[in-house]
């Protein structure tokens, strides 16, 4: 039986993707009637051509800027084909730090205390199941 990976994204990127740019946004209730979160990503090939661009509004339950960045990362990793080698560019220093602690490291129970532990666990699973070689840069 083939190991099936559950998908959260209906987008399937081509294997020619070399770089992904991700961004998340969060508007607190003080600047809006209600808080809102969104994320976006753009997939680029090695020649610099935009292959795909995607954005979405996400649930504002327990909203935070970091959560929108993590969700952008999760969605774009889910859109990649198996065995992809990819560079992900982000402007979120905390995302880079947590990636090193929670994804590019052996599992540690401390991840379960992280407020976004379900998202991080999903990222770990997708990276492993799809055999993704991911490098995050700022």
Image: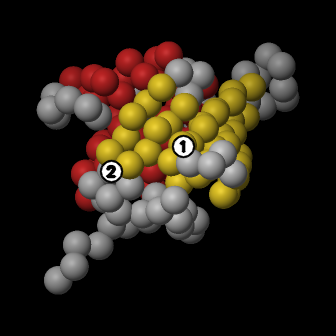
Closest to the observer, 106 or 15: 15
Q: Which residue: 22% across, 79% down?
A: 2
The local crowd at label 1, few if under 14, some if 14 to 19, many if 20 or more residues have their Cα within 10 Å, is many
Q: Which residue: 66% across, 45% down?
A: 48
Q: Which of the 4 quarters of the picture holds residue 1?
A: bottom left
Mark in front: 2 vs 1: 1
Q: Which residue: 46% across, 17% down?
A: 94
Q: Is residue 54 above or below residue 9?
A: above
The local crowd at label 2, few if under 14, some if 14 to 19, many if 20 or more residues have their Cα within 10 Å, is some
Q: Tell me: 92 left or right of 33.
A: left
Q: Is residue 60 visible?
A: no
Give residue 107's position: percent from left, percent from top: 16, 34
Q: Which residue is mark 2?
A: 132
Q: Which residue: 83% across, 19% down?
A: 31
Q: Is residue 106 visible?
A: yes
Q: Residue furthest bottom?
A: 1
Q: Which of the 4 quarters of the picture holds residue 20?
A: top right
Of the image marks 2 and 1, the number of the one nearer the N terminus? 1
Q: Is residue 123 above or below residue 34?
A: below
Q: Is residue 24 above or below residue 8?
A: above
Closest to the observer, 65 or 50: 50
Closest to the observer, 99 or 84: 84
Asked which colour scheme the image uses, the reply is secondary structure
Give residue 69's position: percent from left, percent from top: 56, 32
Q: Tell me: 131 left or right of 95.
A: left
Q: Secondary structure at mark 2?
A: loop
Q: Which residue is mark 1?
A: 19
Q: Which mark is residue 92?
A: none
Q: Secondary structure at mark 1?
A: strand
């Amino acid at each position: 039986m083939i190991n099936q990976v559950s998908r959260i994204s209906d987008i399937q990127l081509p294997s020619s993707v070399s770089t992904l740019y991700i961004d998340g946004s969060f508007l607190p209730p003080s600047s809006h009637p209600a808080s809102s979160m969104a994320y976006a990503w753009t997939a680029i090939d090695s020649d610099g051509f935009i292959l795909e661009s995607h954005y979405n509004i996400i649930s504002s339950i327990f909203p935070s800027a970091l959560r929108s960045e993590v969700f952008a990362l999760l969605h774009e990793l889910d859109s990649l084909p198996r065995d992809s080698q990819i560079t992900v560019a982000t402007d979120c220093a905390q995302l880079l730090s947590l990636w090193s602690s929670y994804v590019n490291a052996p599992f540690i129970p401390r991840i379960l205390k992280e407020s976004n532990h379900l998202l991080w666990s999903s990222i770990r699973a997708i990276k492993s199941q799809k055999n993704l070689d991911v490098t995050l840069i700022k």
